[in-house]
Amino acid sequence: MRIDKLPIRGGGFRFLPIMTQEEYRAERNSLNDTGLCLACGVEADGCEPDMRKGKCDACGAADVYGLEELMVMGLIRWEDE
Ligand SMILES: [Zn+2]
């Protein structure tokens, strides 16, 4: 998973995942339960796939989302294989 850093209105950044369908499947099949903090772009393990607004260990923001939830919300930018 690569992370895209997008400037947001009013300042600051938002971090969104970029991955291929293959990488998504591999992550979902792994036991890592990967999540992503949209506030700082740090990947977190041990997230429920449908986690929303989990607390980030790195920056403290309640902005950690599970991988499946990111997909459902349409926040993953799909890359070609
Ligand atoms: Zn964070």
Image (tube, grey):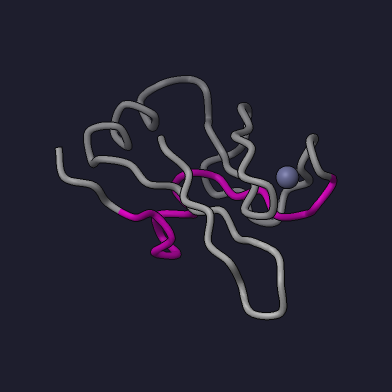
Locate residue 51, reporting x and y percent. Answer: 61, 48
Residue that protrudes farthest toward the left in the picture: 81
Q: Residue at x 63, y 79 (%)?
A: 9
Q: Residue at x 59, y 39 (%)?
A: 48
Magenta range? 60-77
Check if residue 69 falls in the magenta segment: yes
Q: Quadrant of residue 13?
A: bottom right
Considering only vertical position in the picture, is 40 above or below 43? below
Q: Is residue 31 left or right of residue 42?
A: left
The foreground one among 6 and 21 is: 6
The foreground one among 28 and 61 is: 61
**Quadrant location of the C terminus?**
top left
Q: Residue at x 33, y 41 (%)?
A: 19
Q: Quadrant of residue 71?
A: bottom left
Residue that protrudes farthest toward the right in the picture: 60
Residue that protrudes farthest toward the bottom in the picture: 10
The foreground one among 6 and 53 is: 6
Locate residue 66, reporting x and y percent. Answer: 55, 45
Considering only vertical position in the picture, is 10 above or below 54? below
